[in-house]
Amino acid sequence: MKKVLIITYYWPPSGGGGVMRWLKMSKYLPDFGWRPIIFTPKNPDPSIIDESLIDEIHPQIETIKIPIWEPYRLFRLVKGIKKNEKFKPGYISEASSGNWFSKISVFIRGNMLIPDPRKFWINPSVKYLTNYLAKNPVDLIISTGPPHSMHLIALNLKKKIDVKWIADFRDPWTSIDFYDKLKLTKWADKKHHTLERKVIEAADHVVTVSPNCARDLNVVPGKTVKVIHNGYDPEDFLTVDSVLDPDFSITHFGALNRDRNPSALWKALGSFAAKDKTFKEKLRIQLIGQVDEKIIKEIADNDLQNNLTLINHLPHKKGLQILAKSQVLLLAINNSLNAKGILPGKMYEYMALKRPILAIGPTDSDFAEIISNTRIGVAVDFDNYTELQKILNDLFNSYLEHNLAVSSNSIESYSRKNLAKKYIDLASQ
């Protein structure tokens, strides 16, 4: 059996979207004759913990862990934050417009911690893996970022060891939504772009998650960035209960920060509820995971506080159970410059549940094209209040008629097993 070393910061018990791509891809690699070896920090500082994901690690996977030092611990000490308090996803966007201390911390993050706060793990990891690989050779290395320090580990290994390397960009580097909020100097901006280009030049293959992201990364002549989507694991849905909620439930699963706040939706829901008593009685907004306080306030400002149910982060499969019962699944896209290329991992799981998706974001985007092609829902532009009113009316009427359903098409191509096969095909090229 061939061996593949996967360098990733996010691994169970870390939770959230960052861990799912390679937890699930690695699960199916042994089916194609590849044994995964996971290299990950012993003591990471993720924003979400999900102990249940440990049970999903394939038994043939070998896991290597070494300690990491991260400046977040120092940041907590200086700011007086509790040792075990987690940072919310989207912290940079919030901090960049916060008080002086928050602004300074963002400046340090962008200009001194290049490419990211995990940079202090690069040299120890290269030293460890150089010795490890000398005794335990592998046939392929995959680095997955962010954090993009993982790519720099692989870049340095590539200089020392003749082994094929795939750089996997789950999110962009210099075109990520918060890049313009890092308060970068010209020197730091150049440094980020230089390192990004070095990774793309040196990797045998570069992979990302959407066509728009691939276009952003196509900066090296002759190097074509490949697209391998995120997806869904069919096994996650074998025991999902499909009995629907009696209420008209609209559910979002995962972190909901202020950059992906669908303000027009709250306004449209509030207006509908003010005019229609039945809608007001039946509506239930369910937000599962970390939610920005600004979003909760906007919902209340539209007189929907009694229709809101906030649920703390749940183990992955428990979250899927709630989603499966929901009448409508909310997909909120970051309102940012790279919005057209954002394909959230949750979208594919929404697709597998075969419940109508209401997506808020640019309608000329990668996610809107997939939703349209698979006939799994509708996409509405961020501020298209009029169209939202019409869509909500149609969805609610279908719900009242017990006919709120979708006729999905060709979603099987997004199964994790089919997607894992694409990495194997790349490895042979």
Image (cartoon, rainbow, N blue to C red):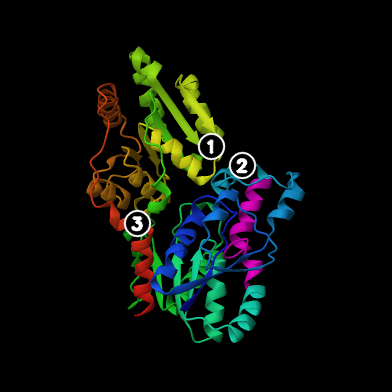
* Left or right: 320 in relation to 278: right
The reply to whether residue 261 is visible in this rendering is no
Q: Which residue is drawn at 40% across and 71% down?
A: 206
Q: Which residue is drawn at 48% across and 45% down?
A: 317
* Number of residues whose C-alpha sits closer than 10 Å to that of mark 2, classed few (under 14), some (14–19) or many (20 or more): few
What is the secondary structure assignment of the residue under circle 1? Answer: loop
* Number of residues whose C-alpha sits closer than 10 Å to that of mark 1, classed few (under 14), some (14–19) or many (20 or more): many
Q: Mark 3 points at which residue?
A: 415
From what the image shows, is residue 331 above or below residue 211?
Answer: above
* Left or right: 23 in relation to 373: right
What is the secondary structure assignment of the residue under circle 2? Answer: loop
Q: Earlier in the sequence, mark 3 or mark 1?
A: 1
Q: Percent x, y for residue 100?
A: 67, 45
Mark 3 vs mark 1: in front: 3
* Left or right: 74 in relation to 2: right
From what the image shows, is residue 189 above or below residue 79?
Answer: below
Give the quadrant of the C terminus. Answer: bottom left
Q: Magenta span has 115?
A: yes
Mark 1 vs mark 2: in front: 1
Q: Percent x, y for residue 214?
A: 35, 64
Q: What residue type is labelled 2?
A: Gly
| Stretch in magenta | 101-122
Q: Which numbered disc covers residue 98? A: 2
Q: Distance between the residues labelled 2 and 3?
A: 41 Å
Q: Name the residue under label 1.
A: 291
Q: How far apart are marks 1 and 2 (CA)?
A: 18 Å
Q: Percent x, y for residue 18?
A: 51, 55
